[in-house]
Image: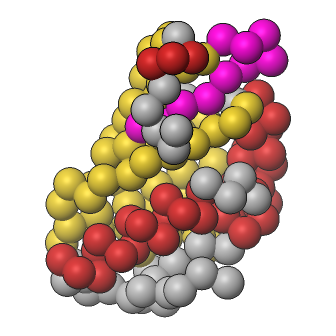
């Protein structure tokens, strides 16, 4: 189980929380990732709207079956009380070997327990060449 950091956040704890999230997502283990969210967590990921851990697990399994060799980098943009704004980019390829860099922003809201209760992500994809990769290379 990942370290649980509870709000309200300081700069140090917010930076640590973002790093833990990056490390966790890079495992590509949907069940482990889902444990960082409340049972009734609400998500918007692109045009997908999800509620609850079961939906999160199913979504992430589909995602990582499609987005192969996924590698993610997150960066804290701001925080206040129990909320954070994070920018990210990740790289992946599809089954045909075409590479992409996906950019986005996330808004996070945490419960008192330190688990994330809301995650809203806006994401754009950019086709790249394999030699242009820079995340986790």
Residue 51 visible, this angle: no
**Left or right of 136 in this view: 82:** left
Residue 110: image location, x then y, percent: 41, 74
The answer to if 36 sits in the magenta stretch is no
Query: At 47% across and 38% down in the image, what residue appears?
Result: 135
The magenta region covers 89-98
**Left or right of 13 in this view: 92:** right
Residue 73: image location, x then y, percent: 43, 48
Q: Quadrant of residue 59?
A: top right
Query: At 67% across and 84% down in the image, what residue appears?
Result: 1
Residue 72 visible, this angle: yes
Q: Is residue 43 above or below residue 112?
A: above
Colour scheme in the image? secondary structure
**Left or right of 10 in this view: 98:** right
Q: Quadrant of residue 62?
A: top right
Query: At 59% across and 70% down in the image, what residue appears?
Result: 37
The answer to if 97 sits in the magenta stretch is yes
Q: Quadrant of residue 42?
A: bottom right
Q: Nearer the viewer, residue 94 or 80?
A: 94
Q: How many marks?
A: 0
**Left or right of 57 in this view: 106:** left
Q: Nearer the viewer, residue 26 or 42?
A: 26
Q: Nearer the viewer, residue 84 or 39?
A: 84
Query: At 78% across and 65% down in the image, what residue appears?
Result: 31
Residue 104: image location, x then y, percent: 38, 35
């Amino acid at each position: 189980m990942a370290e649980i950091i509870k709000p309200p956040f300081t700069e140090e704890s917010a930076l640590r929380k973002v790093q833990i999230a990056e490390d966790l997502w890079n495992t590509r283990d949907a069940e482990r990732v889902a444990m960082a969210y409340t049972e009734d967590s609400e998500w918007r990921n692109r045009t997908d709207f999800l509620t609850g851990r079961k939906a999160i697990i199913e979504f992430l399994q589909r995602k990582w079956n499609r987005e192969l060799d996924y590698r993610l980098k997150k960066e804290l943009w701001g925080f206040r009380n129990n909320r954070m704004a994070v920018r990210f980019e990740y790289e992946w390829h599809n089954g045909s070997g075409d590479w992409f860099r996906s950019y986005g922003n996330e808004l996070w809201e945490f419960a008192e327990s330190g688990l994330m209760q809301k995650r809203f992500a806006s994401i754009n994809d950019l086709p790249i060449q394999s030699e242009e990769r820079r995340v986790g290379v």
